Amino acid sequence: MIDLKSVSLIYQDHGKEVFACKEIDLGVQPGEFLGILGPSGSGKSSLLYVMSGLKVPTKGSVEWLNRDLGKMGDQERADIRLREFGFVFQYPFLIGYLTALENVLLAFPAEDRRADAEKFLIELGLQDQMHRYPYQMSGGQKQRVCVARALLGSPKVVFADEPTAALDHKSGRAVMDLLIQNRGQGALVVVTHDPVMLEGADRIIRMEDGEIKN
Amino acid sequence: MEGANKVKSKLGATVYLRRNLGKTMPLIGVIILAVMLIAGIVSLINSIPLSIKTIYSYSRNYVAVTPRGNALLTPLLRKSIEQGSPVEIDRLMVIRGTDIEVKSIVGNWPFVVLGLEQSDMDYYLMRMKAKVLNGRKPAVGEPEVMISEKLARNLNLKLGSVIQKPTDSDNYSPQEVKVVGIADSEFWFAFGSVEYQRENHFPPIDALLVFAKNPTDQKKLDDWTTATLKGENARVFTYQELENQADTMFNILYQILNVVIGTLVVVITLMMGMLMNIFLSQRVQEFGLLQALGYTKRSLIMRVFWETTVFVVGGWVLGVLVAWGLLNIVKVTLMDPRSFALDTFDQWAYLYSLPVPIAIFAVSILTVFAKFKNFDPVGVVERRLV
Ligand SMILES: Nc1ncnc2c1ncn2[C@@H]1O[C@H](COP(=O)(O)OP(=O)(O)OP(=O)(O)O)[C@@H](O)[C@H]1O
Ligand SMILES: [Mg+2]
């Protein structure tokens, strides 16, 4: 579904080239749970951003359903992110002046998904938080709202970058389980440095210095 | 369908504004104050030439001609006007005039008390569109005047009040001249008996008032008289001339006003621009997150565009309403009692305040463009930017 062909992401650091990703070949299959493990600075996040079209690779190509993301316009790439992908980031980013429910609805602005959004929030144990603002919620609750936002609209791939890093072990585990159970037919790509969070993964790849070491 | 609209309106133009009143209200307040200030200053300054034009608007109804220094000129002037006039003359009055002073918001201005023949008084009142009359017309040779209601209010005069007296050098007459009649009229005027003025006032020279038959011909008559008597020993007073004088007089004042308001707009815009910049920077997280989720830069810029539109248009409209309200209060409590002119619907005053919202709008949009130009949402979601 997603195909990375010899992908490199290079940053310029004071004239020196830093390879955040180095000639990576990787595919993501429909519905699979792919885990990406590696130490800090190994290029996990960079790989995730390249896969999801948030960054354009310096070399190589990323194909979504056999179409090169790098050759699309900003508008089209943004559209794919909005409709086909879901995102959970390390920090529970929510818009402060919108309620939990409204924040979830942001993920799919084109249609009325209110019933779906409410269903997800209830499944994630947030029925009482639905109409609260982010400042009235705990970090774990906020991250669960982010999970609901990522799942709204049944995305084909959910990307999660260290979704549990800002949470204690128990809430982290809960968030992972919710992601795994509620993703429906969607694939799940999770980046983490904590192998425990990848329990139940179909496939795990390890990164070091921008390269896959398996 | 109600649900769908609700979803769409999640990021409607007013959501941010309404839910962040602590931030938006002070900014709207500044726009309101600025608009109010500018509209207020401009209307008050405009009220001065407006006063000149209202006070002397009686001269729209006739052209006045006064010979210079020689009483024998009057019949000659009369003859040349009667013979040469390009329009039909309805009446030509031989009159006298003496000076009094009226009050304005910028001090006293000269005004004339006409001396009229008894036979001309009714015609004069008719041309001044005088309606209800209180009291009576001045009697032949008596120290009496009839004045218009607006003048009465300005000088706080009632029936029986003294308008000119021997001890008042600004409103001088050898005898005490009393108000015996007050006429309702849109014009300001005062007239007494021409016999009294011939007896008591200097110089001993009669002047002329010439009324066109058809009021719409008056301007033609005015222009012809001005052109014909140019270089003669006569002064011609027309409304046109008065208007031109008022306009040149205020030319420099308006130029100063333009500089002051221009500076004000620049200062307010800079200040607001900086505030908008701060507020937009606080929202970088929001914009980065939305972009990461798949919103386009274009859609985010459009959002800020609509938010800013609602915000500046709303601020301007409120500012205009507040200014209008305050000007009405000023008019009713301070201006009307002395019949000072003030136009609370002065369109120039409101137009002058337009640069404020426009400049603020432009600065906000430019700020957003600059911020989005090289914006990388990954910086936000990675928390490298806040
Ligand atoms: N904007 C940038 N400019 C320069 N170098 C960068 C930039 N972003 C990332 N890097 C470098 O790229 C490499 C990979 O970074 P990345 O964020 O992908 O690591 P990571 O595996 O996600 O680490 P962590 O577990 O700490 O999040 C690092 O060496 C980092 O310093
Ligand atoms: Mg990372």
Image (cartoon, coloured by chain):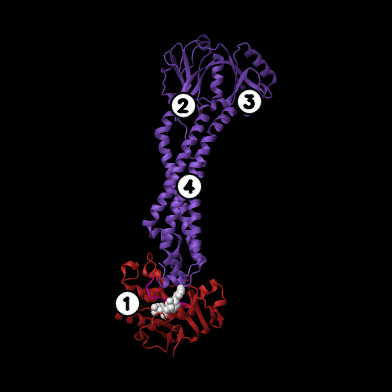
The magenta stretch is A84-93
Task: Give a yes or no on whether discs 2 and 4 share a subunit.
Answer: yes
Q: Which residue is mark 1?
A: A167
Foreground pick, B206 / B218: B206
Q: Which residue is mark 4?
A: B265
Q: Amino acid at mark 1?
A: Leu
Residue at 39% in and 34% down: B333
Q: Secondary structure at mark 3?
A: helix
Percent x, y for residue A86? 44, 77
Specify the subunit that label 3 lies on.
Answer: B
Percent x, y for residue B151? 46, 24
- Label 1, label 3: how far apart the Cα atoms are: 90 Å
Which residue sits furthest front? A15
Q: Which mark is residue B222?
A: 3
Q: Secondary structure at mark 4?
A: helix
Mark 2 neighbour density, 10 Å: few (under 14) some (14–19) many (20 or more): many
Q: Which chain, by letter, is red?
A: A
Q: Amino acid at mark 2?
A: Lys
